[in-house]
Image: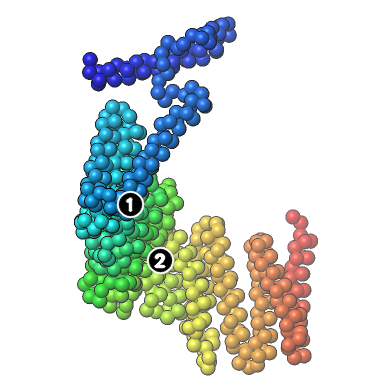
Amino acid sequence: MSDKEKEAIEQLERRVATLENIVRRLTVVAGSTEPRARPLPSPPPSAPPSRPAAPGVTVTAKTDLEQWFGQRGLLAVGVAALLLAAAFFLKYAFDQGWVPPLVRTIGSVIGGIGVAAWGHERIARGMRRYGAAMIGAGGGLVYLGLWAAAGPYALIERRIGILLLAATTVAVTMLALHHELEPLAIWALGGAYLAPLILQTAPNPQGFLGYLEIIGLGTAITAHAMGWRATFNLALFGYLFLAAAGAQPAIAAPLGCWLIAGAALLALHVTGLHPWPETRVGILLGAWILLGNGLANIGAAAQARWFGLAAVVAVWGMLGWQHVRRDPFDGQALEERFLFIASPLALLVLASLARLRLLDMHFEVAPLALAVVYLPIGWLRRSAAHLVTGFVLVGLAMAFPWRASAIVLGWISLALLAFLVERQAARPGGRIASITLAVAAFVCLFSAGLIDRDIPGSRAVFTDRWALSLYLLAASNAALARSWGREDRAAALLWTLCGSTIFLGGSILLEDYFSRVTRLAGDLALSLWWLLFAGALVSIGFRLNRGLVRSTGLAVAAFAGLKIVLYDLSNLEALYRVASFFALAIIALTVAYAYNRRARQPA
């Protein structure tokens, strides 16, 4: 009888023993559930078990710890000790000159191959963990021998040493695939990534990036085929990290940009099939950072910059196609929504870093080109996310060539158009785009619009471009709020924007106009305007039976009263003080009369 037949019989006996133990335990459990069943008699202490316990079957905590330490702990210690012994021997032999360097190197390589072959044979006999450790140890010995040959001994050229180390990595990876052992693949990949670092070859960014491309993407493709998540992540993240550390000049070239984009494209393809969010987000962010650095330092030739930017467009296009197939805001994870928003922004930022003449002169072409893609998709597929993004991109395109007042008018028009798209054409997303543009127009009017306003020396305070934009913004917000068609937070926000526009705009215009007479007149006009606005809010609140509107009016009145008492009383002249306090008295008495009159009415 051969050894293989004996081993097969032993494995069969262990499996039968395992089944017997399982059946015995199930019988005991089933018997304990019966009300009148007597417990099975336990065997005498001295009686040995009929069958030996199967490997891996839990008996006690003590035997578990013992088994773990014997199988894994001692195995790890042995492998580490073997590698350290080989490394120390090579160093000591080098220092003492015992054996010629060529013999030492060849001996280490042959010994490593022998250990790996023995590990391969152990796996074939069923000792998978032990065999995998031996293959890893053999690969480590080969790494040490090749490192010694290409490093301190200088027996071969360093670049050839890197290629031999890469070949060793391929061999170990093939064994990992053959035996389906992911830890062995991770070990091989780590050795391949460390090879150029430990040999410290002369700077060659192009060759280094090509080496990383072959090792990183090749291993990532293999890991994808095997479904190895950890190996795939290590391959791509290690590729990007080492490329950033040692191949920056090579990335600042069209081919380098495409090599980095290749990692992002592979990650997008694989994560479209597997839910690996850390890979999808992390690789894209890393690729965008490296591509931005590369495009910012790319050569002066316009054709090269366009070709490098095409790599960024390819990444954006693949991610966009995946978002067309699966709406990121329809039950998808949070990272998909983040990538949907970040993708066009990243493309615009990277396009600005490319320093292309067309974009330098007319950068509005970039967001308009993207809007031409997003708007038809949102319209045809009724995708709210794409429609909103398209309108926002058109609004962004307006911000580059126009002045602030013109931007406000353009965004108001877009807000009305977006509202009509959903109201009349039943395309989702129009309301969201409308209120987004309305808020953006409000912010622009009272920030960049005020800075850009040509008010000094101008007599047309109430009819200049900024004032006209103010009137149109207030009117458009009122029209949108009135036509919204439902009572929700969006409609309330539009009414709030309308009231805030009137309040702030009126304060600015009146203070500017009357300050030309005297500064005191401007302060008085501001106090009177606040009081009148507060009275109007209280009146509207009573008419519409809106407590929040009335409370807002009272808050404005209180703020105006504080201004009159704390500021006007000490800075205004006598006649202006009289006017301020007289106006405060009239508004306060009127509002109090309204509240008292309402209190007398029955509920």
Residue pictured at 36% horizontal, 18% vertical: 15
Residue underneath mark 1: 91
Task: Name the foreground residue: 75 vs 565.
Answer: 75
Q: Which of the labelled discs sits on residue 312, or is there none?
A: none
Label 1 residue SS:
helix
Residue pictured at 25% horizontal, 49% vertical: 99
Quadrant containing the C terminus is bottom right
The quarter of the displayed image where residue 204 is located:
bottom left
State which tag comes first along the sequence, 1 or 2.
Answer: 1
- Density class for disc 1 (Cα within 10 Å; few <14, some 14-19, many ≥20) is some
- What's under tag 1, amino acid-wise? Lys
Percent of width and height locating residue 568: 73, 84
Task: Name the foreground residue: 12 vs 33.
Answer: 12
Q: Is residue 177 above or below residue 348?
A: above
Q: In the image, is 601 to the left or to the right of 522? A: right
The quarter of the displayed image where residue 199 is located:
bottom left
Percent of width and height locating residue 137: 32, 41
Residue pictured at 75% horizontal, 80% vertical: 566
CA–CA distance between discs 1 and 2?
A: 65 Å
- What's under tag 2, amino acid-wise? Val
Task: Name the foreground residue: 282 vs 487.
Answer: 282
Percent of width and height locating residue 278: 41, 50
Of circles 1 and 2, which is in front? 1
- Density class for disc 2 (Cα within 10 Å; few <14, some 14-19, many ≥20) is many
Q: Is residue 392 above or below residue 533?
A: above
The quarter of the displayed image where residue 577 is located:
bottom right
Residue underneath mark 2: 392
Residue pictured at 45% horizontal, 71% vertical: 412
